[in-house]
Image (cartoon, helix red, strand yellow):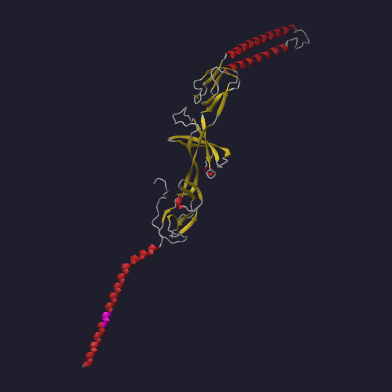
Amino acid sequence: MDTNKNKSFYHLLKHRSVALLLVLFMGSSACVALVTLAKSPKEDQVQQAVLPKVSSTVLIPTDHQTTLNLSGVLKPAEQTDIAFELPGKIAWLNAGFIEGGIIKKGDVMARLDPFDYQTQLLNKQAELALAQARLSEQIALADVAKKEWATSAHVTDLALRKPQVASARAHLKAAEAELAQAQKNLARTHYYAPYDALVAKRDTGLGQVIQAGQPLGQLVNLSYGELHVPVAQFDQPFLPPLPAADVRIAAGNNQRTGTLTRHTGLLSDTTRMAYYVIRIDDPYALHSTLPAVHFGQFLQAEIAGITLKNVLKVPQEWVKNDTLWLLSPEQKLLKYSAKVLRREHSSVLISAPPHSDYQLVTQLPDYPQTGMQVRAPAPHTQLAVKGDKQ
């Protein structure tokens, strides 16, 4: 009996142990499952945090019109040293014929005493009348001679007074020419302004007796002025074809327009810059309500240059040593050697990369490498450029 009881007790203990082990195993599995479920998000976050984070934007190639910002000093396009072609005494001077005065085109600036030239004119008129009378006389005598010699078989030109008539005609033409010269000289006692002019200086005075060609002063043409602007060698390829109109001219708060006309053909000895000329019509605003600009004034010019096709305009800080970084569709970095076409202010213009499905990296990890796996949020839909209006 004792043996049977011992066996029954042993079997009961064995079954209870197995059940206990099963319960402990199931409890452990449940705990492991709970712990796994509780830790998996953190482990995923740790795994994601291992990949460097970058910022990127989509590539937006565009056609960009370049601009050139230049400056220079406005200079006269034409200066004239004025003088009478005749000697005489200054009898009258225009009130505006003073240094800094403005004379309109066609205005009389000065007059010589006309007495001597009026006398010469009367004398030449009298000589012309005599020449006309002499010609008439010779023609009449020639008619008489022609009748007298009408029956003669052999008659000379001298007998018919043909040389005398020709001489009288020549004297008449000479008298006519001398009269025209006297009339011209009388007209030259008035000096007319050849164009709208600024009087740069005056070298004569009222009552002064002058010789032919003696300087009276100097005029500056106000019809137009020229702004000479230096252009660096790296800017010259971006200049538009000449002539180029609608050049914006700034003089402080005043705005004017001009035309880029030509290259002077000269380079600066010191800077090696080329000089170009911008024409500004009516700079002193004599015939318009535009603000006036003055010779010697420092002006700013903005020229619309050529248009660059299929380029990217990016901030300067995104390009290091003429390279930038791209992000592949597989979220890997690619170092791209950019072809820098031009730098404008804080931006760089580069040829658009051929990788149309790549993104432009705007913020890099500390130690970027080509082929590095990174993670990036959704790219911006617009390429933001420092200084551009958003």
Task: Check the image and report above or below for 238 versus 3.
Answer: above
Quadrant for residue 210, please give it. top right
Q: As drawn, is 312 to the left or to the right of 15?
A: right
Task: Check the image and report above or below for 256 versus 34.
Answer: above
Asked if residue 247 can be seen in this view, the reply is: no
Most prominent secondary structure in the magenta stretch? helix
- Name the residue located 28 percent from the left edge and 76 percent from the top edge: 26
Front residue of 138/385: it is 385
How many numbered circles does the render carry? 0
Residue 137 x, y percent position in the rendering: 68, 8
Q: As drawn, is 96 to the left or to the right of 151?
A: left
Asked if residue 343 can be seen in this view, the reply is: yes
Task: Check the image and report above or below for 330 versus 217.
Answer: below
Front residue of 176/338: it is 338
Residue 299 x, y percent position in the rendering: 48, 36
Front residue of 152/124: it is 124
Residue 303 x, y percent position in the rendering: 49, 40
Residue 133 x, y percent position in the rendering: 66, 9
Q: Which residues are magenta?
A: 17-21
Quadrant containing the N terminus in the rendered view: bottom left
Task: Check the image and report above or below for 222 versus 69.
Answer: above
Residue extending farthest to the right is: 154
- Look at the image and say whether residue 186 sits in the magenta stretch: no
